[in-house]
Amino acid sequence: MREPEITPEFRGERVAEIRVAAGLSQSALAQALGRSQSWVSNIEQNYRPLNADDASLIAACFGVAVEDLYAPLGDPIRWIGHGAPSDEPAPFAADEITPLVQLLERLARRERDDLIEQFVRQARVRVQDSQLTRRRRR
């Protein structure tokens, strides 16, 4: 088994901490991201590095700023859309994610896969739009 890839900036345990606080299982997060449960597990255990695109997508699913994924364990979580200050808008607020995941769990696999694909595409578009807006401001 490989050794965990831990950088000074990123700790997978923080992703797990936020996931648990959001009330999501690894499977539910994986479904929302269009990834496997083992992919989420590998991120949380530092066996897989987190690139910028994946960090943006995970943050969007949680409804937090990307910076929160890199904060130390135990730091307050700044939920976007819940009055917490942040300069990084999330494509989806946390209260939009939970009902989606609950709906996905009741659907047939094909319907679920189609919806997940649409969700991931929309999240990526929203993240890209947000990044373009920030670049224009600079």
Image (cartoon, helix red, strand yellow):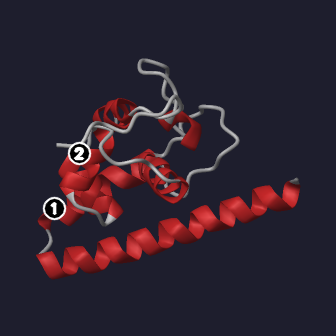
Q: Amino acid at mark 2?
A: Ser
Residue 45 in which image quadrant: top left
Q: Where residue 92 sits: x, y (%)? A: 49, 56
Query: Front-most of 40 and 62?
Result: 40
Residue 99 in which image quadrant: bottom left
Rendered residue at 42%/17% (across/down): 74
Q: Secondary structure at mark 1?
A: helix
Rendered residue at 48%/22% (across/down): 72
Please say if 97 is above or below 73. Answer: below
Rendered residue at 66%/32% (across/down): 85
Asked if labels 2 and 1 touch by Cβ distance under 8 angstroms, the answer is: no
Asked if residue 83 lies left or right of residue 133, the reply is: left
Quadrant of the drawing holding the N terminus: top left
- Per the rendering, the mark at residue 41 is 2
Q: Where residue 31 sits: x, y (%)? A: 25, 61
Which residue in the protein does label 1 denote?
105
Rendered residue at 46%/74% (across/down): 121
Q: Where residue 26 sits: x, y (%)? A: 22, 47
Please say if 53 is above or below 79. Answer: below
- Label 1 or label 2, whichever lies nearer to me, is 2
View extreme (top): residue: 74
Q: Amino acid at mark 1?
A: Glu
Query: Front-most of 97 and 136?
Result: 136
- Label tally: 2
Q: Earlier in the sequence, mark 1 or mark 2?
A: 2
Residue 119 in which image quadrant: bottom left
View extreme (right): residue: 138
